[in-house]
Amino acid sequence: MNPPTADLVMVVHGPEAFDAGDVGRLIGLLSPRRVLVAGVMARTAAEESGLSVVCTDERPSRVLAALSGRACLVNRGKTPESGKIFGEIVAGRLGGLVHVETSSGTVYCWNRGDGTLTEEIARLTGYGLVHAESEGARRKGVREIRGCLPGEAVFVNGIVIGTATAETVVLASENGTLRAVSGLDPKPHGFEKLLRAGLPEIRKAWCKSGAVRSAPPRQGERPSRGGRIAVIDHCGHTLYREIGEKVCGILSVGDDTTAVCGHICSHSGIPVFGVVDGDADAIVKPGYAPGSVVVEVLDGRDDDVGQELAAVRGLEADSWEDWVQETLRVLGERVRIVLDLRGG
C-alpha cells in the first residue's frame, strides 16, 4: 500500500539536507512522487548523492509557486532558528506552506497551509508539528536578513557584500543605490560589483548569510580536454547555466567566485583558471579538478585582469593545457600562481 504522501512533491533547498542524509531518509519515509532541488550548491550535493531528483536553479518560492497539488519544502538551516526564519520568508511569498525543517525535526504549517499533509508528514517522520504565521509586509525599500551569525559572509544575489556583525542585517535601497543600515561590516567592492549588475529590488533579492556549503566536494571524471572556455565573472551562482557538454574549462574572476566554481567543477571534473586578488571570504570548502590553476593579481584588481583575458584570449581551445600555458604567458609577471594542479 502506498503511503498517504505518495502524491507529494518534495522541494529541497540547500546542500545540507543532502549532505546530512535527510533527503534520502525522507524519500524512504514519504515516498514522494517527485523531488525537486532548488539552488546551485544544492544541485551539486544532489548530483553527488546519486538520488533520483530533478534539479533547478530557481529559488524555492518560485518552484513551489509553479506547482499544483500537494507539496512541501525541505530545508536544513545552519541553526533551528535560521531554518525557521527561512521557512517564514518563503511562506511570506506564497501564503500557505508545509515546511519540513530537519535541523530541529519540525514540520511547520505556515499561514494555515495544508494541515492534513502537515499531520501526515509529522506522523511518518516522528517530527514535531507547529502551526505558525509569517509576518506581514516589510517596509518599502528595506530588507532584513535575519538569522545571521556575527562574522559570517552576507550575500545579495550571490555576491558577498560584507560580514555580519549582528543576528539581523538591515539593508536599504534609496536614491538609486544600496546601503547597509545596521548589522553589517560592508565590503565596498562587493557593493560595487552588485550595483554594476543593476540595482536589485531589495525586497525580492536573493539574500543569505554563511557558507554556501560546509561539506567538501567530490572528485569527478574530466569530460573533455578541448572545447569551449566558459567565463564566470563574480557570479558563481550562474555556473550551471554555462556548463555544457562542450565546455572544457572555466575562466573564473573573483576570489569567492573561483572558490565556488572550483567546488562545483571538482565534481564535474572541469578544470578552472581562476583570477583572484586575495579578498576571499571562505564561503565554501576548497576543491579543484586536476588541471586547475589559480593566479593572484599582483597589481590592480581581479576584475580588470579577468575582463582583459575574456576580451583578448580565445574562448575555444583544442587543448585546455595549451590554453592555460598561453594565458600564463600573456599575463607574465602581473600575477603569481597560487594553485597549480597541472600534471607533470
Image (cartoon, rainbow, N blue to C red):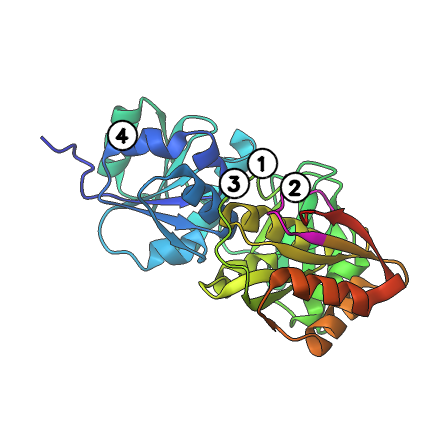
- Residue 306 in the magenta stretch? The answer is no
Residue drawn at x 32%, y 60% as measured from the top left:
66
Residue lying furthest front: 344
Q: Residue at x 23, y 31 (%)?
A: 120
In the image, the segment drawn in magenta is 281-293
Residue 288 within the segment the image draws in magenta: yes
Q: Which of marks 4 and 2 is nearer the N terminus?
A: 4
Q: Distance between the residues labelled 1 and 3?
A: 26 Å
Instruction: Name the residue at the left extreme.
Output: 1
**Disc 1 target residue:** 216
Q: Are marks 1 and 3 in contact (CB under 8 Å)?
A: no
- Name the secondary structure under disc 2: loop
Reading the image, the residue beneath label 4 is 28
Q: What residue type is labelled 1?
A: Pro
Residue flagged by tag 3: what amino acid is it? Ile
Task: Give the labeled residue for mark 3.
Answer: 85
**Outermost residue, top direction?**
126
In the displayed structure, 153 sits above or below 104; it is below
Q: How far apart are marks 1 and 2 (CA)?
A: 7 Å
Image coordinates of residue 251 in percent, x first then y, are 65, 63
The numbered disc on residue 286 is: 2
Q: Distance between the residues labelled 1 and 4?
A: 25 Å
Q: How crowded is mark 4: few (under 14 residues within 10 Å), some or many (20 or more)?
A: few
Could one spot residue 279 in this view of the protein? no
Contact flag, marks 4 and 2 (Cβ < 8 Å): no
Camera-nearest label, 1 or 4: 1
Q: Nearer the viewer, mark 4 or mark 2?
A: 2
